[in-house]
Amino acid sequence: MLVKNQLLSLKAYEPGKSVEEIKKDYGLAKITKLNSNENPYGSSPKAAEALANLSSQFAIYPDGGAMNLRAKVASHLDVDEDQIIFGAGLDEVIQIISRALLTPDSNTVMASPTFSQYKLHAVIEGAEIREIATVDGCHDLNTMLSQIDSQTRIVWICNPNNPTGTYVNETALKNFISRVPKETLVVIDEAYYEYVTAEDFPHSLSLLKDFDNVMVLRTFSKAYGLAGLRVGYGVGNKEFIQRLEVTRLPFNTSRLAQIAAEAALEDQDFIQGCVKINEKGLNELQAFCKRHKIDFYPSQANFIFIKTDKGHELYESLLQKGYIVRLFPNGIRITIGTEEENKNLLADFEDII
Ligand code: PMP
């Protein structure tokens, strides 16, 4: 069987060890999972309530257009309903965009490091990938601009950036977008938007009024705590979104995901509470790093990136104490846990360093 050449260099997604396996391998009774930037407090109880008694509808296809959720998200964001495309998580929205825009004779520009799926889909579509190293964990927007040419279909701005947690501010983003050619799509991935506290963080949705080549991505997987149900969305220019809709699978978001997301969106008190606790945890962890002269990037998200060339050792030491974090070539990324998890982490960290 012949497959696209591009697939030959790729490995299928390999799930890491399960929590149960790690417990067994390391002889641990308890594991704290701080590797995937999930909400440690879960989701709004209203989401669970909304899902009770849905079993009579399991046999029925969901609403492919997610019309109820669409109306609620549109009103929440103050955009038109037909400016939104839903995906089974942002992973799928990223796939849809890449599939619709990238061809083997095109290129796409992104930071490095940044969220891995932008590159994966570019490889699958056979497009050239132009990765621009971050400076102090931040997008190097001038160098990114210099790499855009007539064949550039997509520029990815992950804001805040995963894995570094840094952000592009309003002035820098506006200036960047105004210099990108109109034929190139600028995707602003705001998966961690709800956690941001910086006052000069961009009002990205208002940019949509002035720029047809901008798309903003948000998800229910992070602060809303619905990663397991898979629902995220992109917002952009109506005509462009309708083109993307052609490549979307007809029933890509399940009924359960849509209903839970509607309920979660309505419970903004839950989000506010989680965001406050996250900010406190993040501040404590950042203060700890400063005190101990640990190199880190200041974060606007629900994780922190610690820069070290001893990442592997640190990763192993934390694992032995029961913390799963994410290992990168030049450091580790730690998700902010619950208040208690954070307190325990700092105490155990003290023993390690
Ligand atoms: N974008 C960024 C920046 C992310 O960190 C993630 C998840 N790790 C995603 C998109 C995808 O999230 P989901 O598919 O769960 O919406």
Image (tube, rainbow, N blue to C red):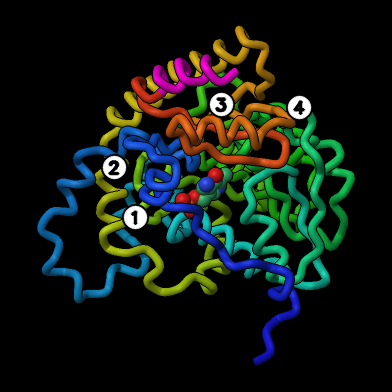
Q: Which residues are magenta?
A: 342-353
Instruction: Report if residue 280 lies within the magenta region.
Output: no
Q: Quadrant of residue 342?
A: top left
Amino acid type at circle 3 is Gln
Q: Marks 4/3: CA distance?
A: 14 Å
Name which residue lies at 71% across and 81% down: 4
Question: Pointers 1 and 4 in contact (CB under 8 A)?
Answer: no
Residue 89 in picture, x, y percent from top left: 45, 55
- Which is nearer the N-term, disc 3 or disc 1? 1
Residue type at numbered disc 2: Ala
Residue linked to disc 1: 229
Which residue is rendered at x = 59% and y = 67% of the image? 12
- Reading the chain from its start, which is encountered first: label 4 or label 3? 4
The residue positioned 37% from the left and 63% from the top of the image is: 253
Q: Position of residue 291 (x, y in %)?
A: 60, 7
Lateral position of residue 176 relative to residue 1, left or right: right
